[in-house]
Structure formats: C-alpha cells, structure tokens
Amino acid sequence: MINYVNQVLDFPDKVNGMLPRNNWNEVISSSEDSAKAWLGFVYKVVAFAVLISMLYGVVTGGIDALSGEGSALSKVGSAVATLIYIYAAFPLAQIIRNAGDELTASKSDTVGFVFKDLVITNIKAVGYFAAMSAFFTAVVGVVSYVVNADVFTYSHSLNLAAGVADLPMTVLGTFAGMVGLDSIAELFTGLYGMEIMSDTYAGAGWTIEGLVGAGMAFVGVIIMLIQLYVSLAVYSFFYGLADKFVSWVKAPFIPLSGLK
C-alpha cells in the first residue's frame, strides 16, 4: 500500500524529468549564485538602451537645429556639436557597462556586495557619467565661443540610468538624512537629477565674459569629480565603521591592551 502511495506521490517528479528541455528547476536553484551575473546583464541592457536613446535624441535634435532658423555659423556650430555628442554617446554608455562588469566580477559575499560593491560602483558610475557629460558640454561651449553663436546641445539628465542606480543611492541619502547628516545626504542625492546639458548653448564668443564662461564649464567638471571622490571617501568611511561595529557585536571585547 505504501509503495502505491509513493508511486502516486512520485508521479509529478517522473513527469517533470521526462519533459523536453526542462531545466527550469536547475535555473531557479542556481539563480542565487548567478545573481551578480544577472545584475551585470541588466547593466548591459541599460547601457545599450542609454546608447540608443542618446543617439536618437542627438540625431533628431541635431536635425531640428540644422533645419530650423539660425545663422549659418549657428548651424555650422550645431553640426559640429551633433557630431561631438554622437561620439560622446559611446563612452558614456560604456561607463554603465563597465559598472556591470565590475559588479559581475565581485568576489564579495552577499552583504558586502549589496552594501559596499553595489553602492560604491553606482556612486562611481553616476559621478563619471555626470563628469564626462559635463566635459563634452564644455567642449560644445568652446564651439559656441568660436563661432560666436548659439549651438545645439543634447538635453540629457542622469535619470536615463536611474532605473538601475537610483535605489542604493536613494537609500544611502535617506539613511544619512535620518541620522542627522543632511549635508552628506545632499552630497549623495545631488549626483542625481542634474541637468548636465541644456537645449542650446549660448556662447558670448570672442569676449572676456565668453572665455571665462567656457573655462568655468571645465572647472565644473573638476567640481563634479571632487564631489564624486568625496562621496566615495565618506561612504567608505561609514561602511568601514559599520563593518567594524558588526564584527564587534559578533565578538565583543574591551580594548584594554593599550591601557597601562
């Protein structure tokens, strides 16, 4: 009787093993081990989507600028700016892809991966993305200065990549605000939502004011990088404190060896 019952209970397992190309259970079972690889794949998809979105926006915007009203010099400058942004789209998208590759290659455990590698990688990716975007906008500013006319620039926000990177950074900024570190919270959340390119770049060409403005655009790139590295240093410091505290909780001790 027991054998018959076992045969009935084992029937679904037998059928499952006979199904063609049925490796779904193995995929689910190994999904935890391949989580980093899947996350890296998501970053690759986002990088490709950002690239296509930027190319589409740059090409369509450039065509509108060239076909609209404007002086000949303005259209020449807009054509050069369009080529610059088409060029820029590829290294910008590569920043996101590199972030995914870095996460895929992570050797940290789950806790270290989520609270250290994921956050730090996103801080760097967003900071590099913002700085590189600002750099190419500054280059377009030089073009505007040279032709002494308004030229087209691609209106772009970091929110294009926020679907992947926003969560850990938002949590980090919220946590910093909860513990009273409002200035640090603004430092992290300030990396997001920055309108780093505008619809047109108005260059006061061949004037001291225009020259200073073009130079200050490059200074802005340096400021963004400083903000990035300060964010990395601050987060690494707090993560180190939290890691040491957790280790101490697991094995508490009073450091009396240095007292004499």
Image (cartoon, helix red, strand yellow):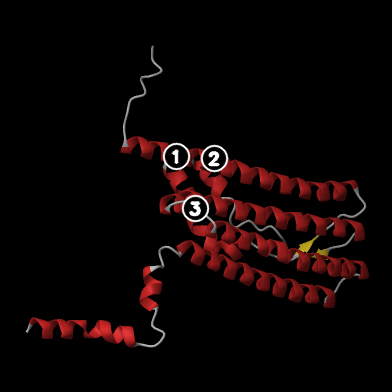
Circles 2 and 1: CB atoms closer than 8 Å = no
Disc 1 marks which residue? Answer: 180
Identify the image quadrant of the N terminus: bottom left
Measured as percent of width and height from the top left, residue 50 is found at 64, 69
Disc 3 marks which residue? Answer: 107
Q: How far apart are labels 2 and 1 at the CA level?
A: 15 Å
| Secondary structure beneath label 1 | loop
Mark 1: amino acid: Gly
Nearer to us: label 3 or label 1: 3
Q: Is residue 153 above or below residue 214?
A: below
Measured as percent of width and height from the top left, residue 206 is found at 93, 52
Circles 3 and 1: CB atoms closer than 8 Å = no
| Secondary structure beneath label 3 | loop
Q: How far apart are labels 2 and 3 at the CA level?
A: 23 Å
Q: Quadrant of residue 53?
A: bottom right
Residue 185 left/right relative to 223: left
Nearer to us: label 2 or label 1: 2
Q: At 51% across and 51% down in the image, what residue appears?
A: 117
